[in-house]
Amino acid sequence: DIQMTQSPSTLSASVGDRVTITCRASQSISSWLAWYQQKPGKAPKLLIYKASSLESGVPSRFSGSGSGTEFTLTISSLQPDDFATYYCQQYNSYPFTFGGGTKVEIK
Amino acid sequence: QVQLVESGGGVVQPGRSLRLSCAASGFTFSNYGMHWVRQAPGKGLEWVAVIWYDGGNKYYADSVKGRFTISRDNSKNTLYLQMNSLKAEDTAVYYCAREGGSRGYSAYLLYWGQGTLVTVSS
């Protein structure tokens, strides 16, 4: 099975900060990676698919990059609505797997 | 608009069974792969199972293989998860989710239900 490792697990930041979250795969997954945002008590929301494709309706301050085993999610200017937990997920091969999550907290 | 509504959760004793349902609407259900994803209280997301759009292939997480069975009824636009031999560690919110592309083209999870809570406890 492919292991997905996210870092950091928690991130403290201020409104307006540039934030970067890293996701590493235990083997190459090409660009078959998605990023999700989840707020407490809510279902996850798709932000990015195929490593760098922005889902329709998602603000352009979110961007994704990477391929192979190293990926990043960047929020260019953190907004109050962005405080949440973020997960990466590989869909290169079954079983699909998620990273452990990164909680973005208010500094 | 796309809607996924899970049901069937509740409190169940260890070793017993439970069947979850996910009613889909707003899209051609038979064209999309469907997944179950769970989240234990205070924990991260765990992928559970997938069934292809035509029901032809099914895959499971190692943690549920042999105990859980995913199925679908395309005539009823409904996804199911039969959970047998339940354990305390199966306690979680269970989400159903639809793939982004039709017929397996894009397997990321675009639409999610609101989730249903399963509690395994004596």
Image (cartoon, coloured by chain):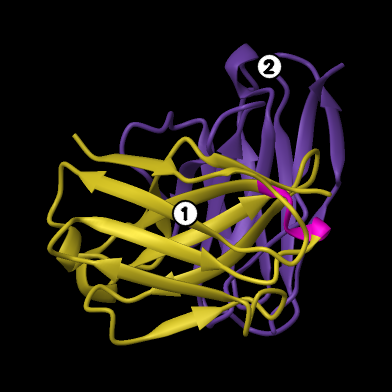
Q: Quadrant of residue A60?
A: top left
Check residue B20 in the rendering and tell me which mark sits there, or answer none.
1
Q: Position of residue A43 (x, y in %)?
A: 53, 36
Instruction: Name the chain letter of the residue that bears numbered label 1.
Output: B
Reading the image, the residue beneath label 2 is: A16
Q: Identify the residue shown where x is 72% and y is 75%.
A: B63
Which three-letter amino acid code belongs to the residue tagged 1?
Leu
Looking at the image, residue A93 sits to the left or right of residue A60; the answer is right
Q: Identify the residue shown where x is 58% and y is 38%.
A: A37
Q: Position of residue A14 (x, y in %)?
A: 78, 16
Residue A85 appears in the figure? yes
Give the purple chain's letter. Answer: A
Residue B62 is one of the magenta-drawn residues: no
For label 2, the SS is loop
Tag 2 and tag 1, C-beta contact below 8 Å? no
Residue B74 higher or lower than A72, as above or below: below
Please state the extent of the stretch shown in magenta in the rendering.
Answer: B88-92
